[in-house]
C-alpha cells in the first residue's frame, strides 16, 4: 500500500486517538532530530527547523550542554558584529513549543548528537518531556542507502508498539546493530510507556552532502500524515526538483555513475506496484482537503 510519493499510506486516526486519551488539555507530541550520524544530508534536523519556522514555535528550554559534548569534536561557532566582537554559539539541544495545531501542541527538539553520557542525556530529555506533558514521541532520522535520486525517497514509520502499528499502519522495527542517539531515545521513550514512532528517510549515498531537500520533503510529508496537520511544502518541493535536476546533470557527466543510477532505478521499479492503489489516491485527496480547509 503506497502513497503517490512512494511511501506507505498512513491511516488517519492517531490525532483522534491522542485526543481521546487526554482529558482537560490538548495532547502534546514531541518531534526530535539530532545532527550527526543520524542525519544524512541534514535532512532530519532541517525538517525540524522547517516545522519550527512554519509553526512559529517559541523557545521552551535547552539541555545542559557542557556535560554532553566534546568541543574538539563538536566545536562552537562564532559570529561577529560590525566592530568585530565575537559571540559564541555552543553546541546544545534546544526545545521549542508550537501551540494549538489542529488541536495538538508540539514540542520540537533539535541539537547535535552528544559525545558523552548518552543515558543521562536521554533521561534529562525525557524529564523535560514529562514536564511539558508529552503524550507521544516522533523521532526523525536520515541514513545513506542504495536508492536512486530520481525516485521518491522512502520515509515510513516504525514502532515497537503493536497497538500503534495497527493505528498507523506502521512497520515493526527490524534493525539490529550499532545505533545513534535517535535509536537510544526511541528505545528509552518506548520502554517508559510513551507511544513512540521513528521515521527514517533514505538519502542516496552517492550524493550525501547537505542539503538534501528531497529527503527532508519525504520526512515532512510523513509528519503531515501522522499528525493530520497540513503543511505548506510548495517551496521545499521546488527545491527538491531543482536538487534532482542538479544531480541529473552531474550524473550525466560520468557514464559510470549514470549506469549505477540506472541500475538502482531498475531495482527500485521492480519493487514498486505498477500503479497507485485506490487507498493511496484517497490519502492524497485527504491531504488536499486538509490543505483546502486550512486555506
Image (cartoon, rainbow, N blue to C red):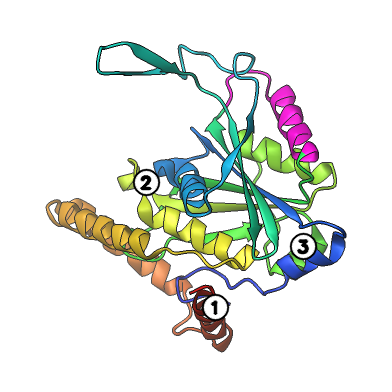
Magenta stretch? 114-131
Q: CA distance from mark 3 to mark 2?
A: 31 Å
Q: What secondary structure prevails in the magenta region?
A: helix
Q: Residue furthest toward the bottom?
A: 278
Question: Relative to 191, is 67 on the left or the right?
Answer: left
Identify whether 176 is placed above or below 2: above
Quadrant in the rendering for residue 130: top right
Instruction: Confirm or deny contact between disc 1 and disc 2 (CB under 8 A).
Output: no
Identify whether 115 is placed above or below 274: above
Helix, strand or loop for disc 3: helix
Identify whether 84 is placed above or below 18: above
Position of residue 66 measured from the top left corner of the image (x, y, whole percent):
60, 14
Kindly identify the residue that appears in the image at 48 percent across and 49 percent down.
47
Q: Is residue 126 magenta?
A: yes
Quadrant of the drawing holding the N terminus: bottom right
Which residue carries the number 1 mark? 293
Give the mark nearer the N terminus: 1 vs 2: 2
Helix, strand or loop for disc 1: helix
Kindly identify the residue that appears in the image at 53 percent across and 14 percent down.
70
Which residue carries the number 2 mark? 205
Amino acid at each position: 500500500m503506497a502513497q503517490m510519493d512512494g511511501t506507505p499510506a498512513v491511516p488517519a486516526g492517531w490525532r483522534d486517538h491522542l485526543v481521546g486519551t487526554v482529558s482537560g488539555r490538548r495532547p502534546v507530541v514531541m518531534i526530535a532530530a539530532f545532527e550527526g550520524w543520524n542525519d544524512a544530508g541534514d535532512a532530519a534536523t532541517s525538517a525540524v527547523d522547517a516545522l519550527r519556522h512554519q509553526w512559529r514555535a517559541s523557545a521552551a528550554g535547552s539541555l545542559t550542554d557542557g556535560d554532553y559534548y566534546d568541543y574538539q569534536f563538536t566545536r562552537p561557532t562564532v559570529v561577529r558584529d560590525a566592530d568585530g566582537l565575537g559571540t559564541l554559539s555552543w553546541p546544545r539541544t534546544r526545545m521549542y513549543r508550537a501551540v494549538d495545531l489542529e488541536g495538538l501542541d508540539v514540542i520540537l527538539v533539535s541539537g547535535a548528537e552528544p559525545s558523552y553520557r548518552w543515558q543521562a542525556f536521554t533521561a534529562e530529555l525525557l524529564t523535560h518531556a514529562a514536564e511539558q506533558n508529552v503524550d507521544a514521541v516522533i523521532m526523525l532520522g536520515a541514513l545513506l542507502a542504495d536508492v536512486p535520486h530520481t525516485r521518491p525517497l522512502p520515509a515510513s514509520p516504525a514502532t515497537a508498539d503493536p497497538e500503534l502499528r495497527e493505528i498507523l499502519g506502521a512497520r515493526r522495527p527490524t534493525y539490529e546493530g550499532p545505533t545513534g542517539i535517535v535509536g537510544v531515545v526511541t528505545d528509552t521513550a518506548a520502554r517508559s510507556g510513551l507511544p513512540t514512532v521513528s521515521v527514517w528517510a533514505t538519502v542516496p549515498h552517492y550524493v550525501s552532502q547537505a542539503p538534501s531537500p528531497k529527503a527532508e520533503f519525504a520526512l515532512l510529508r510523513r509528519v503531515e500524515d501522522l499528525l493530520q496537520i497540513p503543511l505548506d511544502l510548495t517551496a521545499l518541493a521546488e527545491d527538491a526538483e531543482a536538487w534532482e535536476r542538479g544531480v541529473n546533470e552531474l550524473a550525466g557527466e560520468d557514464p559510470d555513475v549514470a549506469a549505477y543510477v540506472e541500475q538502482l532505478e531498475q531495482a527500485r521499479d521492480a519493487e514498486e506496484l505498477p500503479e497507485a492503489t485506490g487507498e493511496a489516491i484517497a490519502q492524497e485527496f485527504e491531504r488536499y482537503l486538509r490543505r483546502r480547509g486550512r486555506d
